[in-house]
Image (cartoon, rainbow, N blue to C red):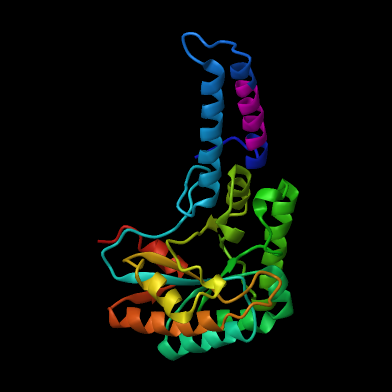
């Protein structure tokens, strides 16, 4: 765990300065014997910056704090999750499919979208699905200050509570981006950070079969699948491909003997043999 409460952008700024100093030292032929110290410092600074950035954006990185991406189990269980909603008509269409196959899912909803369509969040809860916090405005939390991060999480929580009477205890930062401060705030709020292990890039609308193939090729026992019923806060892009792909994914995984569970349930079953 990375315990220092510094923003990633600040650390990268310091590393950039360090790299520049190292390059200048090397250019001026200072401290070149027996090692080119300036060049070595620059290379180490670049490597550190890359490593810190990768840890902030990759879903499975635990450097800044523990995140949940999948479980280790021999049981054929998966968690189906949807981001960026609610967004009519697509959220409702996905809920219809889930009801048809009696499959639970987890929806990470955006606060501003929840205020626009509270009836959909209410339906999500009433039909037995789980709701997670996906911030209020779907902003990149790496670019927000501490107060901004807190506001994004708290406003989304209030919107969800007003719509459906529940307070989520799981959160998914937009794009999955987080640093030490984001993780610290989530811990203070009692929120478990949930990422994913299966990504189909369905938001690019690559075609129904592509979404299905990308998803099924990566699924294994304990997977957390990420799909999108929404489109950030712009709510302009079609999610019809995701709706149709969801039906095919559910049908195929059920045929393979998989059981669908919520994020809460799959976390509880971590490590089961």
Is 247 located above or below residue 205 in the figure?
Answer: below
Quarter of the image containing the C terminus?
bottom left
Would you identify the image quadrant in which residue 75 lies?
Answer: bottom left
Q: Residue at x 64, y 32 (%)?
A: 16
Is 40 located above or below residue 208 in the figure?
Answer: above
Region in magenta: 12-23
Residue 222: in magenta span: no
The picture places residue 152, in percent across and down from the top left corner, at 71, 59
Q: Is the magenta stretch mostly helix, strand or loop?
A: helix
Q: Residue at x 73, y 56 (%)?
A: 151
Is 40 located above or below residue 63 in the figure?
Answer: above
The picture places residue 232, in percent across and down from the top left corner, at 66, 69
Q: Report whether residue 107 is seen.
A: no
Judging depth in this view, the residue of 34 and 201 nearest the camera is 34
| Left or right for 245, reference 184 | left
The picture places residue 205, in percent across and down from the top left corner, at 54, 75
């Amino acid at each position: 765990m990375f315990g220092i409460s510094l923003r990633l952008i600040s650390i990268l700024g310091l590393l950039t300065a360090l790299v520049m100093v190292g390059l200048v030292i090397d250019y001026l032929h200072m401290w070149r014997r027996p090692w080119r110290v300036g060049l070595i410092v620059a290379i180490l600074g670049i490597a550190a910056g890359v490593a810190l950035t990768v840890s902030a954006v990759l879903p499975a990185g635990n450097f800044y704090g523990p995140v949940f991406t999948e479980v280790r189990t021999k049981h054929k269980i998966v968690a189906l999750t949807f981001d960026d909603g609610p967004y009519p008509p697509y959220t409702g269409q996905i809920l219809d499919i889930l009801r048809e196959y009696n499959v639970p899912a987890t929806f990470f909803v955006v606060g501003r979208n929840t205020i626009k369509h509270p009836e959909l969040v209410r339906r999500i809860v009433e039909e037995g699905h789980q709701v997670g916090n996906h911030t209020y405005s779907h902003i990149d939390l790496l670019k927000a200050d501490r107060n901004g991060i807190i506001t994004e999480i708290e406003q989304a929580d209030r919107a969800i509570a007003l719509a459906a009477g529940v307070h989520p205890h799981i959160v998914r930062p937009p794009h999955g981006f987080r640093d030490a401060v984001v993780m610290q705030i989530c811990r203070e709020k009692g929120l478990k950070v949930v990422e994913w292990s299966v990504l189909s890039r369905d938001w690019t609308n690559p075609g129904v079969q592509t979404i299905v193939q990308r998803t099924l090729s990566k699924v294994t026992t304990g997977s957390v699948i990420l799909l999108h019923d929404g489109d950030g806060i712009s709510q302009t892009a079609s999610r019809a491909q995701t709706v149709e792909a969801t039906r095919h994914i559910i049908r195929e995984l059920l045929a393979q003997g998989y059981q669908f569970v919520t994020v809460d349930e799959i976390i509880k079953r971590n490590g089961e043999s």
